Amino acid sequence: MTDYVEEQRNELEAIESIYPDSFTVLSEDPTSFTITVTSDAGENDETLEVTLKFTYVEKYPDEPPLWEVPYQENLEDADKEDILVLLKQQAEENLGMVMIFTLVTAVQEKLNEIVDQIKSRREEEKKRKEKEAEEEEKAFQGTVVTIESFLSWKAQFEREMVELKRKKQKEDEQSGKNKLTGKQLFERDHNLDTSDIQFLEDAANSVEVDESLFQDMDDLDLDEDDPDFEPLDLDSDED
């Protein structure tokens, strides 16, 4: 037959030696006591702290003890609920064995885990704010131009200009608007500067004069008394 009173007394002595500064007996019948659990130091030396209150039942450890969390520091309500669930789970897994040390250790680890989560959330928030500030600064300053970025832009710009020029020429040819200027014609045919002169010479050589039209000049009836008559000044023409 299990001596529950003896087991409870032996565990109580062991717990007091393990947690001398945080262990406090509240009553002896029923046996009730508190243990204060503090997390490791987090960012800015912040810590989490809870006070666990345990009360032995008659058949402990074959039955779980009663527990509650009368005090907490820097702990959110959701985290407190997680701790209560954790205590219930650990108690069920350790029925038949004294378990106070196991329960306190589990809570200690949970507090350290929460501290790490808080630190991680703060770091993510810090990075998010830094990223937002950086994006705002970039939007205000515009894009910083480097030699590499300028050369890349210049090459892309020249390619686009060549493509636009090619498309424009193609469109002009298709619409019949691609007419060559005099300069362009000259550049294509350097003989154009002498072709007009040659054309005039050929035209002059091809003109035939009918001399018979001038043979009967003496027969012309010229009225010298006509006030509008003006004789041809041959000497003036020769000059």
Image (spheres, rainbow, N blue to C red):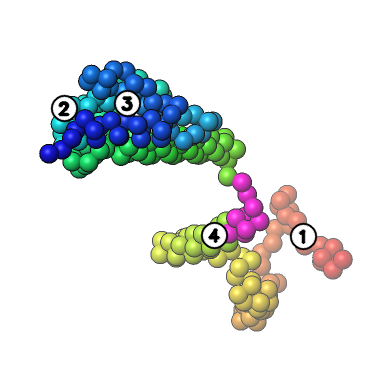
Q: Amino acid at mark 4?
A: Gln
The boundaries of the magenta stretch are 144-152
The alpha-carbon separation of the residues under discs 2 and 1 comes to 163 Å
* N-term mark: 2 or 4: 2
Q: Foreground residue, 165 or 185? A: 165
- The residue pinned by badge 1 equals 231
Are the residues tagged 3 and 1 within 8 Å (C-beta)? no
Q: Report x, y in % for residue 219.
A: 67, 71
* Tag shown at residue 58: 2
Task: Please name the residue shown 62% across and 76% down the image.
Answer: 189
Task: Please name the residue shown 30% across and 34% down the image.
Answer: 11
* N-term mark: 3 or 2: 3
* Tag shown at residue 52: 3
* N-term mark: 4 or 3: 3
Q: Foreground residue, 35 or 173? A: 35
For the N terminus, the quadrant is: top left
Are the residues tagged 1 and 4 within 8 Å (C-beta)? no
* Tag shown at residue 156: 4
